[in-house]
Image (cartoon, rainbow, N blue to C red):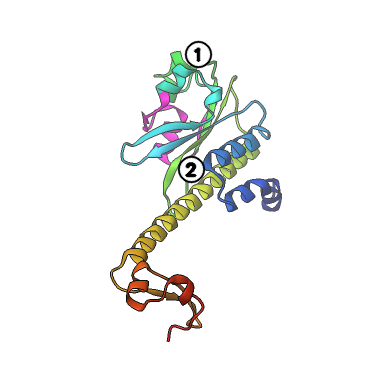
Amino acid sequence: MSQTANYLDTQSIFNLIGHRADLTLIFQTVSEWLEARIPDSMVSIMLYSETEQTLSLISGTKHFSTRYQEAINGIKIGPNVGACGAAAFHRELVICENLVTDQNWKNFKTLIQEDNLNACWSTPIINAQGKLYGTFGTYYRSPKCPTPTHIKLLRHAASLIALSMDLHAEWQQKLALHDKYRSFFTYHPDAIFEHNLEGIVIDVNLVCEDITKFNLEQARGLHYS
């Protein structure tokens, strides 16, 4: 699959990301996109807690029993902790073609038998700066080996999730900075004028009227001089 085809195929996802759609919707859309392209796949997304060194399931819960969800939520990452725990620990793709015989799943045999899970492929969700956000995984009801196309699709889906989380974090930082600025601007004890590059006043703070006797409506549109 070419990069151009990938882009066109995921245009609706890029639109959601660009319009700052809720992350839950983006996760669901990316999951459905991947499930439509890898037969019999069940997509899950787990978020990583850097302080706790754990993973928690936040998308794809419909595929698993309550008992399974409770068992993997808040699970510590490690070299042999399923596919997702190992993928997060090693920060690389982990392919478990047969969970019954895979050493990563030896402590979860009862759980996977109860949920009829027999294969899992997981890749870490890592941004360009190396920040680990979580894992992106696909489960299967029968043993399954990925093709190169499957792996490319899985990594592409994970990159879309990383992009959406990067932009979400950036937007949250901008909102926090804006709120901090507005608080400083509004409640500063001195008169503050905000003007454009031509020197035309576009905003003033609360103290301005007391000091200058000009309220916002009177000051807006005047030259600062």
Which residue is depicted at the point 40% across and 21% down? 71
Q: Are marks 1 and 2 in contact (CB under 8 Å)?
A: no
47 magenta-colored? no
Instruction: Give the Cα distance between marks 1 and 2.
Output: 27 Å
Is residue 103 something that shows in the picture?
no
In magenta, the rendered stretch is 72-95
The disc label shown at residue 125, or none? 2
Location of the C terminus (image quadrant): bottom left
Image check: 31 left or right of 219? Answer: right
Kindly state the secondary structure of the residue where label 2 is placed. Answer: strand
Q: According to the image, label 1 marks what residue?
A: 113
Q: Dividing the picture into quarters, in which one does residue 141 lie?
A: top right
Q: Position of residue 115 (x, y in %)?
A: 52, 16
Q: Looking at the picture, which amino acid does disc 2 mark?
A: Ile
Kindly state the secondary structure of the residue where label 1 is placed. Answer: helix
* Front residue of 161 and 148: 161
Q: Residues within 10 Å of mark 2 (few under 14, many from 20)?
A: many
Is residue 121 something that shows in the picture?
yes
Q: Looking at the picture, which amino acid does disc 1 mark?
A: Gln
How many numbered discs, if any?
2
Q: Position of residue 111 (x, y in %)?
A: 45, 16
Q: Residues within 10 Å of mark 1 (few under 14, many from 20)?
A: few
94 magenta-colored? yes
Image check: 140 left or right of 75? Answer: right
Q: Dividing the picture into quarters, in which one does residue 50 lie?
A: top left
Which circle's residue, 1 or 2, is located before the other in the chain? 1
* Front residue of 28 and 187: 187
Which residue is depicted at the point 71% across and 50% down? 8
* Front residue of 165 and 77: 165
